[in-house]
Image (cartoon, grey):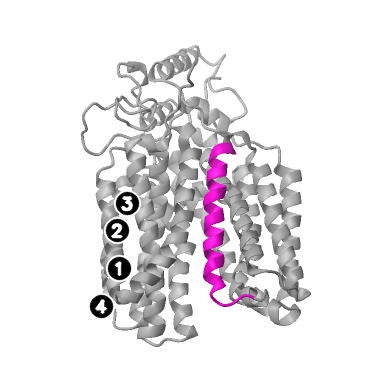
Amino acid sequence: MSRVRTPGPLAGRDFRLLYTSAVVSGLGDWLDQVALLVLVTTVWHGGAGDLALVVAASMLPLLATPFLAVLVDRRPSRRVLILTDLLQAGLTLGLVVAPGVYWAAGLVLVRSALGSVGGLAGQIQLRVSVPPDGVQAATVLLQTAMQSVKILGPALGGLLVAFMSPRAVFAANACTFLVGVIAARALRTTSSPSPNADLHYFKELGEGFQHVFGSRLLRSLLFVMCSLMFVVFLYDSMAALIVPALGMGASYIGYMVSAVGLGGVTGSLLMGRFAARLRPFATMAGSVLVIGCIIVAIGLAISHEMRIDSTVWLCVIFLLGIASAGILVTFPSVVHSETPIELTGRVWALMNSVPAVLNVLAPMLAAALVVWIGLGSLLLLAGAALLLTAVVVAVRLGGVRPTAPPSGADDGAGPAEEPTSGPAPLNSGAPHRETSGPYGKPAGSSTEEITMADKIDKLAQAGFSLNDANDAQQAVLKSLTEDEIDVLLSVKSRVEAAGSDVEGHSLSDPSGGYLW
């Protein structure tokens, strides 16, 4: 008997559009990066200070994303994607006529901020474009694509710059943003605005921080990622020194980047095959252990001036790329599994921006350490820190599994912004999909045609407050159908009508009952 094959995320029309847009945009980013470096150094004859200015302009907006995320969660993800891609296309065309490095840095600064906002909307759109149990598979597909683009992008960018001017490459990149606009307009699903969008801005902002630091898994993941990214950038920022110190020519810097990218593709494919059977933090600990051993080996080779064939080092770096996939796939999978969709923007921004601050500080510390203790010792120190991190993660979190959202839970998706033929009913707030699609549900279930906003409104009017409930209690309440909610409210009202002997109250005491 042949096995029934479960459709993957690419079987869904909206995810195919999102995936295509991400691949095209990622390729355009690499083309843009190469062209910008050539423009600054070759056309404008800028020095290290000019390069640093442009790089800083592209990184600084990452620090502001938690504050922008509130605005993203207030808007349908489809509209945010369209608007940010349109504006980025215009700013990229501005680079075509930019007269100097300061103009370019300003354009890059604003464009990077818009890119961060669009990235948050993309993560939200991912949640409504695939079913809850397909988020991990979708993450693996996107990570594989991004690693593939990492191999192709720099080479294609260098080729285009050789035959075209950098300004012409910017014009080509502007077209990739227009592809994103076309893809976003074709989406049939979009997120609903945050149910708390009428709250004060700072209260909404605080909800994201409260969710991250109130969740043991997210809090632990944030700490681990901060530690990892800081250590990784200690040695990664010194790559231009590491390659010649190993006895290889300058051209091997590019080969090393390609080897890491190829390893990342391989690792992502392996994760896609086995990730469902693995514990996320145990996988992360194993990946960090392998990376730590590799960095220690490189540090020993530099410290003792060993000369090993370049092919061997390329194979070692390829293995490092494979190991990195265990981190790059696990991180977004855990964040999505532990975050309700209405908080996705704020949580995602916070989880990415805090490590980004350390990424800015790490290269400066690395430069000082190289002068003080030497390059080889720096790598040995970084490798030892990674090994220690791997042990701590394995001991403290290795057996933990993320709490995957229940299949019937409210995903917070809203209906498509434009009417489409054959829509499926909203399944307790689940994404609005075509009935003919692989994930669609048959129409006719009237007890489930209720959105998340409707549920929260009904519960709030009756004195319930989901803000005071823990994650498990919120999941139960959000998964109730309309009929179940009506029964719940009916029982509560009858109990309250009984008088002072038995008093109904809200969720102000989350450890107590929901009715009495």
Q: CA distance from mark 2 to mark 4?
A: 18 Å
Q: Is residue 456 above or below residue 157?
A: above
Image: magenta residue range: 248-275
Q: CA distance from mark 3 to mark 1?
A: 16 Å
Q: Position of residue 251 (x, y in %)?
A: 53, 75
Q: Which amino acid lies under the numbered mark 2 shown in the image of this protein?
A: Phe
Q: Which residue is mark 1?
A: 92
For residue 76, say whether it is visible: no
Label 1 vs 2, first from the N-terminus: 1
- Taking the spot 62% from the left edge, 49% from the top edge, the residue there is 221
Label 3 vs 2, first from the N-terminus: 3
Q: Which amino acid lies under the numbered mark 3 shown in the image of this protein?
A: Leu
Q: Which residue is mark 4?
A: 97
Check residue 339 for magenta coloring.
no
Label 3 vs 1, first from the N-terminus: 3
- Taking the spot 48% from the left edge, 49% from the top edge, the residue there is 144
Q: Position of residue 469 (x, y in %)?
A: 55, 32
Report the mark closest to the observer, 3 or 1: 1
- Taking the spot 49% from the left edge, 84% from the top edge, the residue there is 48
Q: CA distance from mark 4 to mark 3?
A: 25 Å
Q: Which residue is mark 2?
A: 177
Q: Is residue 335 above or below residue 473?
A: below
Q: CA distance from mark 1 to mark 4?
A: 10 Å
Characterize the local packing of mark 3: few (<14), some (14-19) or many (20 or more) Cα atoms within 10 angstroms: many
Check residue 254 for magenta coloring.
yes
Q: Which residue is mark 3?
A: 81
Front residue (pair 18, 213): 18
Q: Of helix, strand and loop, which one carries label 3?
A: helix
Q: Of helix, strand and loop, which one carries label 4?
A: loop
Q: CA distance from mark 1 to mark 2?
A: 9 Å
Q: Of helix, strand and loop, which one carries label 2?
A: helix
